Image (spheres, helix red, strand yellow):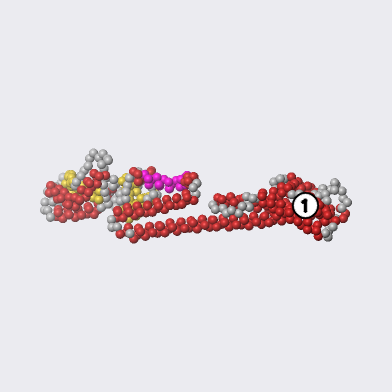
């Protein structure tokens, strides 16, 4: 009973579902003539002419099946090559669907053939079942010739499906190989671009090392090196964008989406770029300027797209002024985003010089006017050229600012202190060179004062006074 229900279900699927192309083909092919030939062949099994007619009829049916199946699968049987990756992907999807449909159809036809074989063994080859009433038992056929005709039709269909399936599987394998070749070709193309970029960068490096190194002027060499490197990198980026856009015209929209995602994921990098734009646009500082950002002081050696490099300046000890800051030899690398939030002090905004002070004290008995003239003359001789350069730079760099008071030139001030007359020397020194200049000025002042008898340096002294005592040792008040 269970076999009967299984048979009914399969028969329903094979006869009522119109989705399969092979079943549509079966409805269009007539087996009446083949059934009639099998009926005659049963009566005359040794008739060779009937066997030839049966073979010819099966050949004719096979051709009809081939024609209609190929017509239904015409788009999939197209052997044209896919040139682009998108076309190849679509062709792969169509080919997989075609192979899956043919495989499913072939399995259904073999299942139907197994059912007919089971029915033949049960009803037509079993002598006890010949007189069984067909109305009491479900059967796919009503006669043995009909069964033979349907079996022949299924066998021919299976043969055609198998040949088509082999053909489509071969084409699928070809598409897989073509896809692999395209992927391998893409890798080769990327490798070629990488090699070209590496060669260009290597050539750029050699030009900088061998050609630009011969420029003696440090500032000019730096500017030309940075300009040349920026031009090379800009050309490489534009060339890559042109190649990518030529091969993928719709890449602009994708780049916009990817760029938005990268801006969120790499927000620190974006802040560094914004900081660099602010430095360049507002001219916050230049290479060689001494700046203080937050609690860090240094001289700018380079500033790039993401970071600014500085030569660290040591912080002063307690009681010392900012004028005694000296280079420590350490290199600081500061993210450009720091300049967006931290206060910035540029010590080189007005000029590359600062006003330094130096104090010395002479005795009250010394000729203080002569001491003033000597100090003024030494300052002018040692720092006169610095004063002129400082004034020239200040006029050039501060013309857009309102500065109500400018102190120019070297000056010597007086003050009365407990030990004598204090002379305060104010003079101009280059930023970072205060100690050498002060040392040279001090040396010349000491030599000049030693040559003068009426000028003595004052120093702290202490005087001991002895009070008279009485005979008993008591102090006389």
The answer to whether 328 appears left or right of 383 in the picture is right
The answer to whether 462 appears left or right of 60 in the picture is left
Residue range (magenta): 260-278
Kindly identify which residue carries mark 1: 150
Residue at disc 1, secondary structure: helix
| Residue 463 in sight here | no
Most prominent secondary structure in the magenta stretch? helix
Q: Position of residue 181 (x, y in %)?
A: 55, 57
Residue that sits furthest to the front in the current view: 49
Q: Residue 191 lies in magenta, yes or no?
A: no
Residue that sits furthest to the left in the current view: 453
Q: Position of residue 14 (x, y in %)?
A: 74, 48
Instruction: Report crowding for label 1: few under 14, some 14 to 19, many 20 or more residues within 10 A (C-alpha).
Output: many
Going 22% across and 46% down the picture, which residue do you hit?
391
Depth order, front residue of 87/318: 87
Going 81% across and 60% down the picture, which residue do you hit?
48
Going 25% across and 50% down the picture, which residue do you hit?
430
Depth order, front residue of 30/153: 30
Q: Quadrant of the C terminus?
A: top left
Q: Position of residue 339 (x, y in %)?
A: 37, 45
| Residue 164 in sight here | yes
The answer to whether 435 appears left or right of 65 in the picture is left
Going 35% across and 46% down the picture, which residue do you hit?
280
The answer to whether 163 appears left or right of 119 in the picture is left
Depth order, front residue of 50/446: 50
Q: Residue 275 lies in magenta, yes or no?
A: yes
């Amino acid at each position: 009973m269970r076999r009967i229900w299984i048979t009914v279900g399969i028969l329903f699927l094979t006869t009522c579902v119109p989705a399969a192309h092979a079943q549509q083909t079966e409805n269009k092919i007539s087996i009446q003539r083949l059934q009639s030939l099998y009926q005659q062949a049963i009566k005359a099994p040794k008739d060779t002419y009937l066997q030839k007619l049966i073979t010819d009829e099966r050949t004719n049916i096979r051709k009809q099946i081939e024609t209609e199946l190929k017509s239904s699968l015409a788009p999939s049987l197209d052997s044209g090559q896919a040139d682009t990756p998108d076309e190849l992907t679509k062709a792969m999807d169509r080919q997989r669907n075609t192979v899956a449909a043919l495989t499913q159809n072939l399995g259904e036809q073999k299942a139907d053939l197994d059912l007919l074989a089971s029915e033949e063994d049960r009803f037509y080859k079993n002598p006890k079942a010949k007189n069984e009433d067909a109305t009491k038992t479900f059967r796919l056929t009503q006669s043995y010739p009909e069964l033979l005709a349907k079996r022949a039709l299924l066998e021919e269909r299976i043969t055609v499906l198998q040949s088509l399936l082999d053909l489509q599987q071969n084409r699928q394998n070809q598409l897989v190989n073509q896809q692999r070749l395209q992927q391998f070709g893409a890798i080769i193309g990327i490798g070629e671009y990488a090699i070209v970029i590496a060669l260009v960068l290597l050539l750029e490096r050699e030009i900088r090392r061998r050609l630009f190194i011969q420029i003696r002027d440090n500032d000019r060499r730096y500017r030309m090196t940075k300009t040349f490197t920026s031009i090379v990198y800009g050309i490489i980026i534009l060339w890559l964008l042109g190649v990518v856009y030529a091969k993928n015209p719709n890449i602009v929209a994708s780049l916009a989406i990817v760029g938005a995602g990268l801006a969120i994921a790499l927000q620190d990098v974006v802040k560094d770029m914004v900081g660099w734009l602010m430095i360049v646009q507002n001219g916050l500082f230049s290479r060689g300027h001494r700046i203080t950002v937050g609690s860090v002081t240094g001289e700018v050696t380079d500033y790039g797209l993401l970071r600014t490099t500085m030569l660290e300046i040591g912080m002063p000890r307690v009681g010392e002024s900012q004028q005694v800051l000296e280079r420590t030899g350490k290199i600081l690398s500061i993210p450009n985003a720091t300049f967006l939030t931290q206060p910035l002090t540029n010590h080189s905004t007005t000029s590359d010089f600062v006003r330094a002070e130096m104090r010395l004290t002479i005795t009250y008995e010394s000729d203080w006017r002569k001491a003033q003239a000597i100090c003024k003359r030494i300052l002018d001789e040692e720092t006169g050229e610095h004063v002129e350069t400082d004034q020239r730079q200040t006029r050039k760099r501060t013309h857009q600012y309102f500065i109500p008071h400018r102190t120019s030139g070297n000056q010597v001030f007086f003050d009365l202190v407990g030990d004598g007359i204090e002379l305060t020397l104010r003079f101009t020194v280059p930023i970072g060179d205060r100690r050498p200049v002060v040392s040279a000025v001090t040396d010349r002042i000491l030599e000049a004062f030693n040559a003068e008898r009426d000028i003595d340096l004052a120093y702290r002294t202490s005087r001991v006074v002895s009070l008279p005592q009485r005979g008993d040792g008591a102090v006389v008040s």
